[in-house]
Image (cartoon, helix red, strand yellow):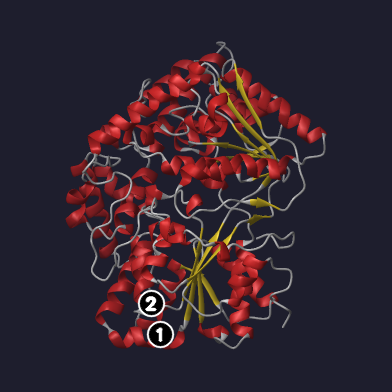
Amino acid sequence: MPDVLADLNPAQRHAAEEVSGPVCILAGAGSGKTTTITRRIANQVRAGAFEARHILAVTFTDRAAGELASRLERLGAPGVTARTFHATALRQLSALSDRPISVIPSKYALLRDVCRGLPSGLRDRPLGDIASEIERAKNARVDPGRYLDWLANSEPPLPAELMHGVYDGYERAKERLAKFDFEDLLERLIRVYESDRHALERFKRGCHSITVDEYQDVNLLQQTLLERWLDGRDELCAVGDDYQSIYGFTGASPRWLLGMRERYPHAAVITLEENYRSTPQVLALANRLVPKLAGAPKKLRPTRPAGPKPLIRSFDGAEAETAFLATEIQRLKASGVRYDEIALLYRVNYRSVDYEQALFEAGIPFLVQDGGFLTRPAARAILRRIGRSEETAVADRVLALAREAHWDPEPDEGLPPQELTRQADLSRLVQLAAEYDDGEKTLADFAASLEERFGSDREREAVRLMTYHSAKGLEFEAVFLPKLEQRELPYWRALERGEIGEERRLFYVGMTRAKTNLYLTCDRNRARSQFLAELEGANLPAKTRKSILKDTKSTRRAKAKTSGKASTSFRSPSEPGLKPHLSEDSWKPFSRSPTHKPPPTTRGTDS
């Protein structure tokens, strides 16, 4: 077996040497988290603390689980079980069942049938919004019978009674087919272990140590299953970074990570702060957000040599800003930066079309992560209708199709995210059709022009366009963060609810994706993001400070109106067996004495 402790910095080595739990590893961005996890597990095997077959490593994606397993095998520790929560639950349920477990790959097919009974004006609502709401409820362990009471002040993607009917209809349809969805796997296994002590003891005999990666992203359902697995044991290694907790809309919360010290007072807490990704200049800027991030204190320390200062610039209008982005991307390419080492991030999906068009016009290849303009529902539906048509009334026909799809030229901002994107895409299609229509070219010509302008480049080397959420876990030589304006980032919905903590963490995640070049831009004719104020402080013009102060006061008023009421972003019902946890702002249990701070080092491995 290779020396699994070689080339680790002192904090990483400390974590790897803690072969028995409970252990909490607070891993800052770019601090070699995956390296530390795999070295610790390999050291558990090497030191004889546990056999590989008795170790379970749980993470959130199949890709991450595969990476863990691959690294452990190279480190001489094959046989460790590395899976997602859902894959682990499926394997355990299958072993306990006398018949195959049938899992639906997506909720869409069943929801499509259920939603046919909706009023005509709501049938075009994206199924993604409805599926996400059902997942949010199930992650909070709320069944249809409790759904309406649980909703409180949150706004489901359909009127509450209709949403309840869809949720109930979906569950009944699934039961008739004897199918499971992914949340069912966890819920069913919890219930099995609660009712069948023999089954739980069988699991415990085979699993002696558990490591959970990305622990800041667990939800109530996952945490409940984890506590059933542990069954009072403390052989747990929890790894995460509350500064990168950005999935509250799914029910995820960093409170279980932050509550580790409270639940396990004897836990070893190790903080990884040496960053192997970004230049000192990028980290110095990102660290300015730390005082407002709360949670467990972490300040990233650079190990890379100096690089260029991040650029913060405002422009006279969105067109000037977008033109600068294209020009600067071309300059970076000319200087030797590959296109696929450049990322442009935005807060909401429908913003992608602005940058798709600008990059196309500049001759820059691009690839939209998780679906660009033409792959989203509005464009797909209309392109299917016009793709082969020889009609020349392009504007009129597209307008008619948009109206059939219940287009609203001035949609309510309060619409669910995917419906808001659909409405924005319909508006863009109507606008593009009007600009294209010359009375001679056909609808088929228009469809072809859209494919040429907005079809993502299939080349491997292409600029990456993606949301902040999609960028988590990735890194790029150059990162552009445009439209840093109030109501964009922080998003308007978070501002009105007085819940901007997660928006700030999104911004932090965006900045810490950059290795060398970081660009923060905005339209000077709009109120700049208050997060820019937190970075620049008193250097902001008085007019901008006044604008931000006005928005902040509005946020406080919105928060005051909702005080004492259930949270609209995450509520979890009281569950027996779950101990109270700290809020994400409760950082004091992780305050470290000087003896806990590792000495500076220049060595380490990236994750």
Looking at the picture, how far across and down is residue 354, in whole percent?
57, 27
**Image quarter of residue 559:** top left
Point out residue 312 in the picture as x, y percentages from the top left corner: 63, 28
Task: Identify the disc placed on residue 229.
Answer: 2
- Residue at the top extreme? 439
Q: Name the residue under label 1.
A: 204
Neighbour tally class for label 1: few under 14, some 14-19, many 20 plus, Cα within 10 Å: some
Q: Is residue 213 above or below residue 276?
A: below
The foreground one among 352 and 471 is 471
Q: Are marks 2 and 1 in contact (CB under 8 Å)?
A: yes
Question: What residue type is disc 2 on?
Answer: Trp
> Which residue appears at 26% of the width and 35% of the height?
560
Three-letter amino acid code of the residue under disc 1:
Lys
Asked if one can make out residue 448 in the rendered structure from this viewpoint, the answer is no
Disc 2 crowd rating (10 Å Cα; few below 14, some 14-19, many 20+) is many
Task: Using the image, determine if residue 417 lies above or below residue 67.
Answer: above
Q: How far apart are marks 2 and 1 (CA)?
A: 7 Å
Q: In which quarter of the image is residue 70?
A: bottom right
211 or 258, which lies in front? 258
Say which quadrant the C terminus sits in: bottom right
Left or right, 420 with reference to 374: left
Disc nearer the start of the sequence (2/1): 1
